[in-house]
Image (tube, rainbow, N blue to C red):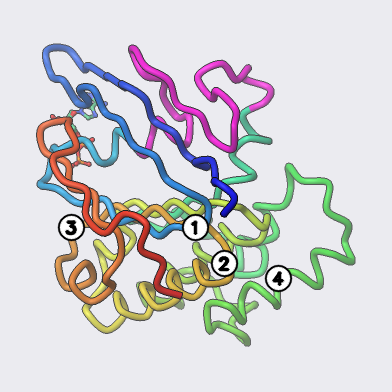
Amino acid sequence: MEEKKPIIEVRDVAKVYGKNKALDGVKLDIYPGEFVILVGPSGAGKSTLVRLIIREEKPDSGKIRVAGRDITRLAPRELPYYRRNIGIVFQDYKLLPTRSVWENIAYALEVSDVSDEDIQRRIPRVLSAVNLSGKEKAYPDQLSGGEAQRVSIARALVNLPKILIADEPTGNLDPQASREVADILEKINCQGTTVLLATHNKDLVDRMRKRVVVMKQGRIVSDQNQGRYTC
Ligand code: ADP
């Protein structure tokens, strides 16, 4: 069998804030097509690791390679292109309140060289993928939390990313809406996108039966079900 290379490779990464060791010797390999759930108590370092992988910040030491590139060396002008290949979803959706659902998603295509024709084709497709066909004209304040989060997932998908990273995406959602979000992430993963999900939501972790990486005090303390593909 052909040996796959990791799509995300974190090596001996450390990050310190003042006296706080947010990350301390973190090593993590994520392979193409995997679904990895990152868990751990508040303050364990999950969000810091996410921020380093999306290159919002740089590690103090260690290396992070994504799709074969050392992202600690990306120049500022390369960052929009780098992030375009990663879909990012946050707890608070980060939708533009004065723009419609359609405009929020189209906005994510602005740094891309996507033709108008392609935009017209892609937006209905991603809205359908998150079960929101027909909501194009709605504004964020007309959406439930679950719908708003699904719009943010659609926006993340519209650039056809190879990796989707979700940091506590169900943090503001009730159990039903959380399950809908989880089901969508699972479906996206089964269509080939690598997913990294940082969450506190124990119900989701138990239901999803994925690889679970546990962090504590800036370290990975457990990594279960490696190599499990459940699609
Ligand atoms: P988690 O996402 O698991 O809750 P974080 O990555 O947010 O954990 O935090 C890890 C540690 O780093 C905590 O001790 C937190 O207080 C600290 N930390 C994170 N970001 C910052 C920051 N911008 N400034 C200072 N300390 C921070």
Q: Is-magenta flag for residue 73?
A: yes
**Quarter of the view holding residue 82:** top right
- In the rendered structure, which amino acid carries the disc numbered 4? Ile
Pointer 4: what residue? 123
Q: Residue at x 83, y 46 (%)?
A: 113
Describe residue 67's horizontal placement relative to residue 148 as left or right: right
Q: Which label number is shown at residue 170?
A: none
User: In the image, which is nearer the foreground, mark 4 or mark 1?
Assistant: 4
Callout 4 environment at 10 Å: few (<14), some (14 to 19), or many (20+)? many
Disc 3: CA contacts within 10 A as few (<14), some (14-19) or many (>=20): some
Note whether 193 is above or below 72 in the view shown: below
Quarter containing ligand 1?
top left
* Residue pointed to by mark 2: 154
Mark 1 / mark 2, whichever is N-terminal: 1
Give the side of residue 41 with respect to residue 95, left or right: left
Q: Residue at x 80, y 64 (%)?
A: 119
Sequence-earlier tag: 4 or 1: 1
Residue 141 showing in the rendered view = no
Q: Which mark is residue 95?
A: 1
Q: CA distance from mark 1 to mark 3?
A: 22 Å
**Most foreground residue, 107 or 83:** 83
Q: Is residue 18 magenta?
A: no
Give the mark, 2 or 3, whose residue is nearer the N terminus.
2
Between the C-alphas of marks 1 and 2, the distance is 11 Å
In the image, the residue with mark 2 has its CB under 8 Å from the nearest atom of ligand 1: no
Q: Secondary structure at mark 4?
A: helix
The residue segment tinted magenta is 50-78
C-alpha gap between disc 2 and disc 3 = 22 Å
Image point 28% across, 73% down: which residue? Answer: 208
Ligand 1 closer than 8 Å to label 4 CB: no
